[in-house]
Amino acid sequence: MAQSKSIFNKMSERIAWGILLGAFALFCSICISSSLGLYIFFFESSVPMEAVLQVGRGTAVLTSSDFVERGVRFQEDITGRTSSISTDSQSQSTISFKMPSENSASLVAAVTLKNSTDVKVQRASLPRFSWSRGLYSIVLRDFSGKLDILVLNTPNLLMEIHTPRGEQIFITSKGRYSIDASDTRVKVITHDGEAILFAPLRENNRVIPEGMEGVLFAGRNEPVISPTRPNLLENSIFVLDVPIAEQANNLPGRWGCTNLQDAAPRGNYLIDTLEGRSALRLVRADNANSHGETKCQQRFSEVGLDVTGYTFLQLETTFLVNYQSLSECGIRGSECPMMVRISYEDTNGVKQAWIQGFYYASNPSSNYPSRCDTCSQDHRQINEKVWYTFETGNLFSVISSTVRPARITAIEFYSSGHQYDLLVSEVALFAGYVDAVPDVSGQ
């Protein structure tokens, strides 16, 4: 009997110890899980980033995660886990990725879809708390076409762009980038910053520093890195080399601006910032009802800049028309809120000019001309209050061979009309040589 009682006591003691140790282990597990969960919540967790689709010209097609497809003419928030955006041959749109701030959303990156471009926004997230160490993550997939990317100074940023063939582009630093993905190649141009181009399956990768371009041809695993086409203009993004307190009364180096008007009020030009972009702002207000112009130009030497040694010449500019009071470009087609002009001498030494105008306001009943007397092509209608990037294409192909540019004497952009408000963030003139058609046969 005593022996049975002793055995029972030992079993009870073991059970008690087992329960105690189990409870302690459970307590430790709860503490570790809670601590890990709190760490992840405070330091690693993320929330969706605000993403807004703005259409600069034409119509963008937005397909949401529920496979509902709709045309976007002006602006729409991108919601849902995955959204696909496409533009046709006449359209352009910009996806602005933003993080919340005290007064308004602050821009993280702007991705401009040029014409005939497709991309899928798979993820856009930011750290739950501003002081945490999580990533600002933007993942774009199934990309084909052309993208212009502006990335602002955002710590811990990782932007991934994936093509259907498996090429990948990683961007982690502030800068400006152009990416072109076609059936034959992927090209990455780093105007400012640094990008990484990966071959499919990440078998090879190359860093593309500022002023360089990387090309990866289909069926090949080795990206080719080379200098990009040079920009013949200086200070294309209007940097001021003076203290901030003095900037309001100064112009960016190499650029000169002036005002012309038939009567008061006078226009104005100044450095300004909108949606994270620094820009030259040309504005005339105060109920002006007479003709006026505010213009900025960069001139070359008296003999001009010789471009006869190139086979490729392209003007690019990014701008936003905030307001115009006239319909279209006025009664003579010469008063657009944004006009660009290339002054040059042709191969016969004759002075010529190439002019392109842009506007958003249109009154069908006005029946104004679609181009000015000296313009070689129609003005373009774009949307108001949206950044728009214009590329001329190769000017040696756009301009008739009989008046082909030989020497560029000046590049000019200006607002013309009664009241206008224009912001121009960049003007560049790229020169070089027409790309050779690659052999993708692998031979």
Image: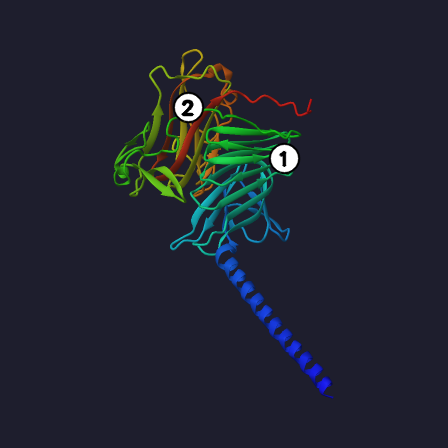
- Can residue 363 be spotted in the picture? no
Neighbours of disc 1 within 10 Å: few (<14), some (14-19), many (20+)? few
Residue 232 disc label? 2
- Can residue 297 be spotted in the picture? yes
Residue drawn at point x = 51 percent, y = 55 percent: 44
Instruction: Report the side of 285 relative to 327 (left or right).
Output: left
Residue tagged 1: 203
Residue type at mark 1 is: Glu
Estimate the x, y position of residue 192 in percent, counting from the top left.
44, 34
Closer-to-camera residue (47/375): 47
Q: Please identify the quarter of the rendering in which residue 252 is found.
A: top left
Name above or below for residue 103 compared with residue 332.
Answer: below
Instruction: Report the side of 301 relative to 142 (left or right).
Output: left
* C-alpha distance separating marks 2 and 1: 36 Å
Residue drawn at point x = 59 percent, y = 68 percent: 25
Estimate the x, y position of residue 120 in percent, counting from the top left.
59, 44
Name above or below for residue 167 compared with residue 443.
Answer: below
Instruction: Report the side of 418 relative to 362 (left or right).
Output: left
Quadrant location of the C terminus in the rendered image: top right
Name above or below for residue 113 compared with residue 128.
Answer: above
- Quick one: label 2 or label 1, which is nearer the N terminus? 1
Neighbours of disc 2 within 10 Å: few (<14), some (14-19), many (20+)? some
Estimate the x, y position of residue 269 in percent, counting from the top left.
31, 36
Residue type at mark 2 is: Leu
Name above or below for residue 102 compared with residue 294.
Answer: below
Estimate the x, y position of residue 175 in percent, counting from the top left.
45, 37
Q: Secondary structure at mark 2?
A: loop
